[in-house]
Amino acid sequence: MTDDLYVADMGVGPEPGGAGSSGPGAVDPVGPADPVGPADPVGPAEPAGPDAGAGPPSEESRRSLERAFERAEFAPFGEKPRQGGHSNIDLLLDVPLPITVELGRTSMTIRDILDLGPGSVVELDRVAGEPVDILVNGKLVARGEVVVIDESFGVRVVDIVTPAERLTSAKA
């Protein structure tokens, strides 16, 4: 009688080959009845026996269930991270990005490109003295002027592009 109540209370079928099975070797799709259930990751709360399921669970099994189902805590949106003053951007600060300085652009036919040789001059869409574009990872971030530093070229930043300008240049 206790086993019948146990099976009814737990919502599991009878054990294979036991009372109520459809014949010898029949397999229950839920699996054999155990006091915890077929997919409990914590393990049985009480030893199986005739009084299994009767009475309150032990203190140890209650604590292990509480640990298995701890409540997740998330920081509210817009709140600064609590990692000792570090933000996620700190993880990216040493990632190298390609920087390109663009003097200007032009369009040429294939015939004109094939005619290029030593001494040829390619006319760009900018006038001399106009600021050059500074692109980081292909995105316009600043404008500057070309300078010479110990026989090497350099760029002095004269203007940082605003986020609104960045959006309009990206769409163009």
Image: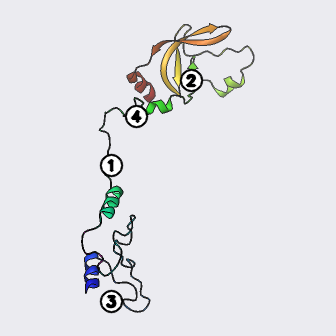
Residue at x 57%, y 22% (from the top left corner)? 100
The residue labelled by disc 1 is 72
Disc 1 on helix, strand or loop? loop
- Contact between marks 2 and 4 (CB within 8 A): the answer is no
Quadrant containing the C terminus is: top left
Q: Position of residue 17 (x, y in %)?
A: 40, 89
Bounds of the magenta segment: 51-56
Q: Earlier in the sequence, mark 1 or mark 2?
A: 1
Q: In the picture, residue 117 is in which quadrant?
A: top right
Which label sits on residue 83?
Answer: 4
The residue labelled by disc 3 is 20
**What amino acid is at disc 2?**
Ile
Q: Is residue 137 above or below residue 43?
A: above
Q: Residues within 10 Å of mark 4 (few under 14, many from 20)?
A: few
Find the distance from the CA under tag 1 to the CA under tag 2.
42 Å
Find the distance from the CA under tag 3 to the CA under tag 4.
59 Å
- For the residue pair 128 and 7, the one nearer the viewer reads as 7
Find the distance from the CA under tag 1 to the CA under tag 4.
18 Å
Q: Residues within 10 Å of mark 1 (few under 14, many from 20)?
A: few
Prevalent SS, magenta region:
loop
Disc 3 on helix, strand or loop? loop
Find the distance from the CA under tag 3 to the CA under tag 1.
43 Å
Find the distance from the CA under tag 2 to the CA under tag 4.
31 Å
Report if residue 167 is visible in the image: yes
